Image (cartoon, rainbow, N blue to C red):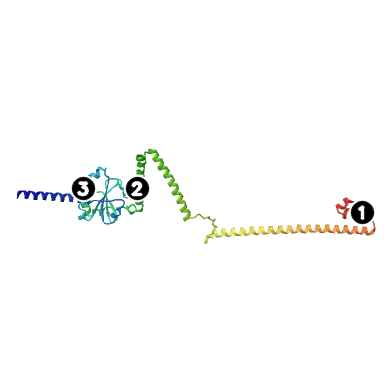
Amino acid sequence: MAPRSHLQTALFLLCLVVLTRQRSMGKKSDVRQVTDDNWTQILEGEWMVEFYAPWCPACQNLHPEWEKFAEWGEDLEVNIAKVDVTEEPGLSGRFIITALPTIYHCKDGVFRKYQGSRSEKDFISFISEREWESIEPVSSWVGPSSVLMSSMSALFQLSMWIRQCHNYFTEDIGIPVWGSYAIFAIATLFSGLTLGLIMVFIADYLCPSKRQRPQSYSYPKKLTPKAAKLLKKLEDELEADDEDISEDEADKEDVSEDEVNKEEEKDGVSDNDEAEDDVDDDKELAGGDFSPSTVRKRQAHNVPESDTSEL
């Protein structure tokens, strides 16, 4: 009987060890790991999220208390999670993590920053007594799900990618540090020029440039009495100037007509004189005066220059 009793005791201890080990393994699984891929799940329900880094001493001290608090998650109906900022830089930028460890409480997408004591009892009291209601929530425009914080997350991820590329250039390939900087400078220059060119094309396509015509001045519909009086005076002066100009033009036309008439009269007198000379010549011919002087006069008066030269 003694050996059987010892065997039963040994089996009991073995079962107890197995159950204890399973329980301890279950404790570790109570804390959920949040990443850039599944972080949107914390927008539904109630969550407590810790942001930590493996090298942080304060985070290491908080770790046991956070694990004990996670055991009460099912009873308190709250999800306990953690984020490794060294592995998830995008979430570090999205939540603006400036100190470690940082703890956030989230209730249906509304975030509040926990700033109380960091012990198991304090965490349990914070959830069970709804102490989080006394904390002012994070503004919506800087909330993790806002456009601004999404851009910040992308910027942090880009910085991490640049760091990885720099390490690859300097450690794996063996490029000097200044050579890695030069590569990034040239890449930044060309990417900026390309982006600027694309933006110019888009702006010109959406808002093409148009030639603007000068706008004609338009008087206001309602004028003050003083302004109306001055406007009427200006219009009268303009009309008077137009009348003076028209009178001057009429006088010039009369003077030009008189000059034309005078010239016509002069031309008429000269024609009459020529006609009289022709009559006198005819009379002389009829009288039979064929003296040399008469002939010369007639030839000089009537004969063209070509004929005189031939004679």
- Secondary structure of the residue carrying tag 3 is helix
Which mark is on residue 89?
none
In the figure, 269 relative to 51: above or below? below
Q: Nearer the viewer, mark 1 or mark 3?
A: 3
Of labels 2 and 3, earlier in sequence is 3
The 10 Å Cα crowd at callout 1, few under 14, some 14 to 19, many 20 or more, is few
Residue 58: x and y in percent read 24, 44
Q: Residue at x 59, y 58 (%)?
A: 234
- Using the image as rendered, state which of residue 205 and residue 132 is in the foreground: 205
The residue at which mark 3 appears reads as: 65
Amino acid type of the residue tagged 2 in the rendering: Gln
Front-most of 161 and 99?
A: 161
Q: Position of residue 56 (x, y in %)?
A: 26, 43
Total labels: the figure holds: 3
Say whether residue 224 is left or right of residue 190: right
Q: Earlier in the sequence, mark 1 or mark 3?
A: 3
N-terminal label among 2 and 1: 2
Q: Point out residue 191 in the picture as x, y percentages from the top left corner.
A: 43, 47
- Residue 171, image x and y in percent? 34, 39
* Residue indicated by mark 2: 157
> Does the image show residue 164?
yes
* Helix, strand or loop under label 2: helix
Instruction: Say if residue 121 shows up in the picture.
Output: no
User: Residue drawn 6% across and 48% down?
Assistant: 3
Q: Is residue 282 left or right of residue 122?
A: right
Disc sitting over residue 295 in the figure = 1
Q: Residue furthest left?
A: 1
Number of the front mark, 2 or 3: 2
The local crowd at label 3, few if under 14, some if 14 to 19, many if 20 or more residues have their Cα within 10 Å, is: some
Three-letter amino acid code at the position of disc 3:
Glu
Amino acid identity at mark 1: Val
Identify the residue at image location x=90%, y=53%. 297
